[in-house]
Amino acid sequence: MSKLLVSPSPHIHAKDSTKSLMLDVVIALIPAVICSVVFYGWQELLVLGVSVASCVLLEWAITKYMLKKPSTIGDLSAVITGILLALNLPYTTPWWVVFVGAVVAIGVAKMTFGGIGQNIWNPALVGRVFLLVSFPTYMTTWNAPKGLFGADAVSGATPLGTIQEGLMQGASVQELTSAYNYKDLLFANLGGSAGEVCALALLAGFVYLCCRKVIKPWITLSIFATVALTSLIFWGINPERFTDPLFNLLTGGLILGACFMATDYVTSPMSLWGGVVFGVGIGFLTMMIRYFGSYPEGVSFAILIMNSVVPLLNMWFKQKKFGRK
Amino acid sequence: MAKATFSIGGVHPHDSKISRECAIEQLPLAPTVYISVAQHIGAPSVPCVAVGDKVKVGQVIAEPGGFVGAFIHSSVSGTVKSIAPRADLAGRASIHIEIAVEGDEWLESIDRSDTLVTAIPDDAKAIVDKIRLGGVVGLGGATFPTHVKLSPPPGSKCERVIINGCECEPYLTSDFRTLLEKGEQVVVGAALLQKAMGGVPCTIAIEENKPEAIAHIREVIGKLGYKDMDVMVMKMMYPQGGEKQLIDAVMHRQVGSGALPISVGAVVQNVATALAVYDAVQKGKPIIDNSVTVTGECFPKQANLLVRVGTPLQYIIDYLGGIPADAAKIISGGPMMGRAVANLQAATVKGTGALLFLTEKQTRRAPETNCIRCGCCADACPMGLEPFLLNKLSKAADWEACEANAAQDCIECGCCLYSCPAHIPLLDNIRVGKGFALNAIRARAAAAKAAAEAAKAAEAAKAASPVSSSEAEKSKK
């Protein structure tokens, strides 16, 4: 008789692995990546390439030389961090700024805490916010998309930035938003970070992830609902001062953040109600920052703030145990 | 209408019922059988034969060792060769009665004809007693003595008998074949259980992946005309056949932590048990054989075999052509809850339902990686537990926290480990925590019982001699 394996049950395993889940997220991001390259041209491809390559290389180097552990780049999570970081940056960002962002995202926000699964904050967002406060010039000079084969770039501000500035100068929201039509926002944004260019491409990825049951929709939907409701209330009270719900849903990277950053497994709550509270918190904080804060958009900060309370939400909101009150 | 299923968690493993077309066939008798005296939950039985005795098929060879115990009958006719410790399926030694097979001579009291006896005796007690004498134990896996389950503690009342025909484990088909080939007997067995519990309604729960069985049993119930008996079609979902899950699915009631099904008015019996009840009550035939699915993609010949209790596994495997070269693991039971077999010389017991052969590719565990906090384990847990948390608490040896987070409620269904994308051995660790939590609970219960008894004794002593006790108090002062 040859050797038989003996181990405790169960003896079979579902096909899912960390890698297969992460691969699904990469696939879901492809439409947005293609869109951003088409709208912003080859410069965007450079940002994406530098970001992904440096994230993966950094994780490999840190596991090999600093932690002296088996490499974890095979799980593809560094690839996702790279793509998300790139989609959060303007396509004009110099390559070395992108690299610094990757160092902060992977080196500080992820590997310092122990690598995948251990980080408290979404690595790509930490990288992005670090760049936002350290290199405001690169991060806020937005150029309107020129397209892959398009004409020369036209300098301009993002819709939310324009409005913030306009409001400070005393203009009304109606005057300021009249320049944008929602079809532009839905299909090809005017100015903004790469990931904001095409809401439909992002939503397609989100639907793909939900269908593959990689993520559950409630976090994203509660963010959308809260943003819509909060802005509806403020806009209803004073349309001169506050922007309308649809405008808020379609701008400022809200869709990218709600679909791909807030739903990150590691930094979001596990239970249904925990997720809903998390989403409501992000939506509400985003709107407060947009309406009353000094930054024109607040999705990144809102997500990072809510990331910090995830351990509490996991403790407070638990599934009802079978046969127990 | 949405098909019924339990309310929390569950997973969908591929059902892999590749032996579903194989009719149950009789396995030829082995030259020697080894019948364990510890093949049920409860006290091991006490052998009542001696070496050299001649026994017949169906003759009692061991008697119950306590109330929670079962009779054990000879599954063959022949001579008792030895009564000695022998390694069981898991490799642990327990007393086995070795019988050399000589012919196939049955006790005269056993009705071996094929006639279906549909008349249900009037006396519920007599039914339960016949079940006890037939050595019937739960054949769904737990092998809990059936007569104990049918004797509810005072104050509790059965409201529904559930016959478990879910067979939610992948690969297993013996219950399915039993429903198809011995549907009449199963239905009569269900009627007997109904009667034993005082004429309560009965639900036969069958998962939707067995449409032939559902149609057949419906037809049989119509033909035999038993009242208050119906078939409930269940959604395919593992672990539907878990007792607590099935009660939740059928009756929408949740059995509390540490409580018995009877506390919510339910009695659950497996299809094979219902058949054994029929045999024991109507035919005078104790459990001497049971259907075993022998299957696996790497196994050349799928089969559902009727195997005499005590047949060595090696004999069954040789009959079907030996172990395939690429088989890496042999499992007694299904792939989710079955036990890996270390010892092919071990013999079958009443509860052996399947022998499954898996290749290394099918069964080898992938290396463990970091938890990504996806919550898949918590979503999958049918008891609503948090496997990721219990895993950590177990590893930290914090048994109090394990108990506070209900590790003792774990039914070891394996859904957490099955679904974990990081391949963390969740259940392996949780089992440890569950063990310690249960020990703590039992120790407290025993201490409370001892304290109550001591108080009672003191009370009694006080009542018997009030003077002396008051004197004792005085002397204390």
Image (cartoon, coloured by chain):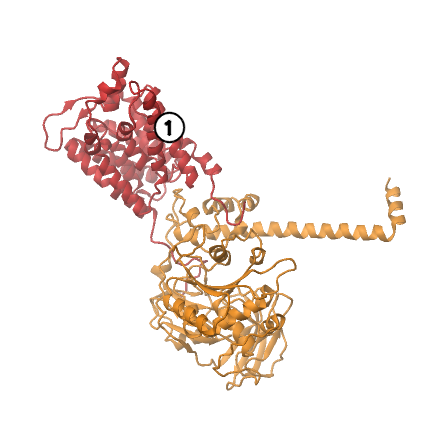
In the rendered view, does A155 fall on the left or right side of B126? left
In the image, farthest residue toward the top: A169
The chain holding disc 1 is A
Picture colour for chain A? red
Q: Quadrant of residue A111?
A: top left
User: Where residue A294 appears, x then y in whole percent?
Assistant: 32, 19
In the rendered view, does B347 fall on the left or right side of A56? right
Quarter of the image that includes the N terminus of chain B? bottom left
Quarter of the image that includes the C terminus of chain B? top right
Q: Residue shown at 21%/37% (left/top)?
A: A33
User: Where residue B110 appears, x then y in whole percent?
Assistant: 55, 82
Number of callouts: 1
Q: Tell me, yes or no, if residue B253 can be seen here.
A: yes
Q: Which chain is orange?
A: B
SS assignment at label 1: helix
- Residue on which disc 1 sits: A284
User: Where residue B184 appears, x then y in whole percent?
Assistant: 46, 74
Nearest the viewer among B164 and A212 is B164
User: Where residue B153 appears, x then y in whole percent?
Assistant: 64, 60
Nearest the viewer among A86 and A206 is A206
Q: Quadrant of residue B263?
A: bottom right
Q: Tell me, yes or no, if residue B39 can be seen here.
A: no
Nearest the viewer among B460 and B448 is B460
Q: Quadrant of residue B48?
A: bottom right
Q: Residue shown at 30%/47% (left/top)?
A: A211
Nearest the viewer among B289 and A200 is A200
**Mark 1, residues whose alpha carbon is within 10 Å: few (<14), some, or many (≥20)?**
many
- B316 vs B150: above or below: below
Q: Amino acid at mark 1?
A: Phe
